[in-house]
Image: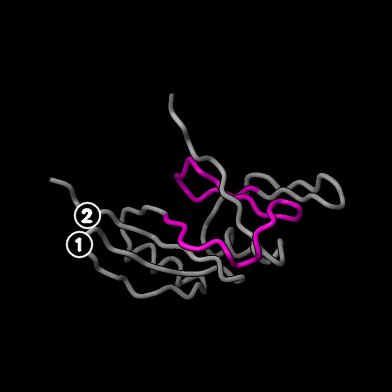
Amino acid sequence: MDWKIELVAIPVTDVDRAKAFYVDQCGFNADHDHQVNSDLRFVQLTPPGSACSIVLGTGITEMTPGSQKGLQVVVADAARAREELVSKGVEASPVDEQPWGLFVYFADPDGNTWALQQIPPRD
């Protein structure tokens, strides 16, 4: 039986600001934005090409805003991904070269952190 991660909660203070950051600056697709009731707003966003989405909103998680650390996304070209982020105003680290891949790090406006990894060629 396959177990597939399909949704990860991102704790934020300002839902509209976070949605704009992920959609306008990071290029995520805006899948859903539904105000269920006064206590629950469900915003689902998906990175391009990903089978896993993120969810943010009100009433979604009890985590403290900014406490989601180290989410990792695999990209084909870390330098190009960094250039795209920086061109849209995201503060991203220089490319960090490690034996297990190339990495670029950034955070959303609340301090939730992300790593982009370019996996090295395999023999």
Q: Quadrant of the C terminus?
A: top left
Dividing the picture into quarters, in which one does residue 67 lie?
Answer: bottom right
- Which x, y percent locates residue 26? 51, 61
Q: Secondary structure at mark 1?
A: loop
User: Which secondary structure type mostly characterizes the magenta part of the structure?
Assistant: loop
- Give the percent coordinates (x, y) of residue 87: 46, 72
Give whichever of 69, 81 is nearer the camera: 69
Reading the image, the residue beneath label 1 is 99
* Amino acid marked by disc 1: Pro
- Is 100 contained in the magenta span? no
Above or below, 16 relative to 28: below
User: Residue 54: image x %, image y %?
Assistant: 58, 50
Disc 2 target residue: 120
Q: Amino acid at mark 2?
A: Pro
Left or right, residue 90 beside residue 60: left
Q: Is residue 25 visible?
A: yes
Mark pair 1, 2: CA separation: 8 Å
The reply to whether residue 19 is visible in this rendering is no
Q: Which coloring applies here?
A: one colour
Q: Is residue 123 left or right of residue 1?
A: left
Q: Give the residues in magenta.
A: 44-72
**Of callouts 1 and 2, the N-terminal one:** 1
Q: What residue occupies the far right of the structure in this picture?
A: 38
Q: Are marks 1 and 2 in contact (CB under 8 Å)?
A: yes
**Element marked by disc 2:** loop
Q: Which residue: 43% across, 73% down?
A: 92
Q: Nearer the viewer, residue 100 or 52?
A: 100
